[in-house]
Image (cartoon, helix red, strand yellow):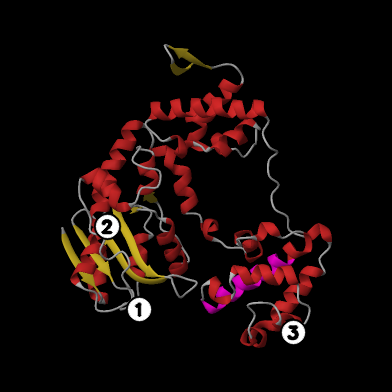
């Protein structure tokens, strides 16, 4: 494997030219996000069958050759736990690399683990133990040490080898198509879109607010999101959840009342007081029917329904064992409850889960299949 560190345009152009005919490329990124809203891209690792490189985006102003390569629809881009990497490329280029292959959900379909880490995956697939010394490295510092570059390159050098083996095993099991829906979601820009007016749903403790106070929280959380985005700051640096909740509970109507809220200092009143009061006013003026509402919880299951869920859970474990997968990957108890309620959006009636478990479990509910006990051992019979 030929390995290199690229921080000059001519090096990048040469590297890209050598990979244009590749059928797949392993890709990873290193970034920093502790002090910003958007991740700061610090390193891009790319590997093909016989060469790999760490590419320095802090030294290269023009990454267009790499963009052209990673957006090539003839090349499968291989990631592990792809979402954050893809979000970075979407922010950087306004487009997402396609097609992709994510080894984390693929590993789950091979029975390796539901959310297996990269190190555990490489150990399982290749028998290679990876160092963890630089998992908390500040990747924005330069120059990078040789050990840091080794750590970063290992993220793609072994990823490519694992991918080829996993692809072959999934193809033999007939499960490659099971991943299509997941990969389609990962490469849909809508997956990464954030709607400020929906951010109140992420505030911890919101369940203690009702009525107009929930509307105030919605407006304040939207303002915080817009501010964080505009200033490229973490949300918690703009306003912490605890202060959002306190403002929603107190609903101050002027600067004096705002300044009396615990956690509000003079600098916040000076810089953002009018904006916060305006959002509170807007929320208070909303008609009752426009107030946000938490999604109602399903009614508590009866004793008979709980017993039915227990039976479905047993059948699910039998299905999971027969397929070599974990029951948790296929469905949770909430998913089973949604199936029992005939919820049209039940997860068990989507994609590969429907064929593997959803339809057999529905047949069990209709009495078309049964769980039999033979010598004290349960089996799911046709």
Q: Residues within 10 Å of mark 2 (few under 14, many from 20)?
A: many
Could you tell me how far apart the alpha carbons at marks 2 and 3 are, in whole angstroms? 54 Å
Residue 5 occupies which quadrant of the picture? Answer: bottom left
Residue with the mark numbered 3: 255
- Which residue does the image show at 65% across and 25% down from the upper left? 304
Q: Earlier in the sequence, mark 2 or mark 3?
A: 2
Residue 221 belongs to magenta span:
yes
Tag 3: Cα neighbours inside 10 Å, few (<14), some, or many (≥20)?
A: some
Q: Earlier in the sequence, mark 2 or mark 1?
A: 1
Whether residue 123 sits left or right of residue 371 in the image: it is left
Which picture quadrant has residue 112? top left
- Left or right placement of residue 356 versus residue 261 in this view: left
**Is residue 299 rendered magenta in the image?**
no
Q: Residues within 10 Å of mark 1 (few under 14, many from 20)?
A: few
Q: Quadrant of residue 235?
A: bottom right
From the top left corner, tell me how far across and down residue 152 is, in percent: 26, 64
> Residue at image x 68%, y 30%?
302
* Range covered by the magenta-colored residues: 216-232
- Residue 172 on image: x %, y %: 31, 32
Q: Nearer the viewer, residue 130 or 169?
A: 130
Q: Is residue 23 visible?
A: no
Position of residue 70 relative to residue 265, above or below, is: above
Residue 255 lies, with reference to residue 73, above or below; the image says below
Residue at the top extreme of this rendering: 375
Query: In which quadrant will I find the N terminus?
Result: bottom left
Residue toward you, 222 or 7: 222
2 or 3: mark nearer the eye: 3
Residue holding disc 1: 61
58 vs 304, nearest the viewer: 304
Q: Determine whether label 3 and label 1 are within 8 Å by CB.
A: no
Q: Which residue is mark 2?
A: 156
Tell me how far mark 3 sits from mark 1, CA to CA.
46 Å
């Amino acid at each position: 494997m030929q390995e290199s560190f690229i921080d000059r345009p001519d090096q990048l152009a040469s590297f890209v030219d050598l990979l244009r005919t590749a059928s797949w490329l392993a890709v990873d990124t290193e970034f920093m996000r502790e002090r910003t809203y958007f991740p700061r891209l610090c390193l891009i690792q790319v590997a093909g069958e016989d060469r790999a490189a760490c590419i320095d985006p802090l030294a290269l102003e023009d990454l267009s050759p790499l963009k052209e390569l990673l957006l090539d629809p003839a090349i499968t881009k291989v990631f592990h736990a792809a979402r954050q990497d893809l979000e970075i490329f979407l922010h950087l280029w306004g487009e997402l690399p396609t097609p992709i292959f994510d080894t984390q959900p693929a590993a789950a379909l091979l029975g390796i683990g539901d959310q297996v880490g990269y190190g555990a995956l490489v150990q399982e697939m290749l028998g290679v133990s990876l160092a963890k010394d630089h998992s908390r490295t500040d990747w924005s510092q330069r120059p990078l040490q040789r050990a840091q570059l080794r750590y970063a390159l290992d993220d793609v050098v072994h990823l490519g080898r694992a991918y080829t083996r996993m692809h072959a095993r999934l193809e033999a099991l007939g499960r490659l198509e099971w991943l299509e829906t997941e990969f389609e979601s990962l490469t849909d820009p809508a997956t990464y879109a954030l709607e400020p007016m929906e951010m109140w749903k992420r505030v911890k403790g919101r369940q203690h607010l009702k009525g107009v106070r929930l509307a105030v929280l919605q407006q304040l959380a939207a303002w915080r999101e817009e501010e964080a985005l505009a200033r490229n700051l973490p949300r918690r640096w703009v306003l912490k959840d605890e202060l959002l909740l306190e403002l929603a509970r107190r609903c101050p109507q002027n600067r004096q009342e705002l300044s009396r809220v615990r956690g509000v200092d003079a600098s916040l009143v000076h810089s953002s007081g009018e904006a916060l009061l305006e959002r509170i006013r807007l929320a208070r003026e909303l008609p009752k029917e426009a107030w946000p509402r938490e999604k109602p919880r399903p009614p508590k299951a009866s004793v008979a329904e709980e017993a039915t869920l227990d039976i479905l859970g047993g059948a699910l474990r039998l299905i999971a064992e027969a397929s070599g997968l974990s029951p948790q990957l296929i469905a949770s108890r909430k998913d089973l409850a949604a199936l029992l309620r005939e919820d049209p959006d039940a997860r068990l009636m989507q994609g590969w889960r429907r064929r593997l478990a959803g339809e057999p479990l529905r047949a069990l509910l209709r009495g078309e299949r049964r769980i039999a006990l033979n010598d004290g051992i349960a089996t799911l019979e046709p």
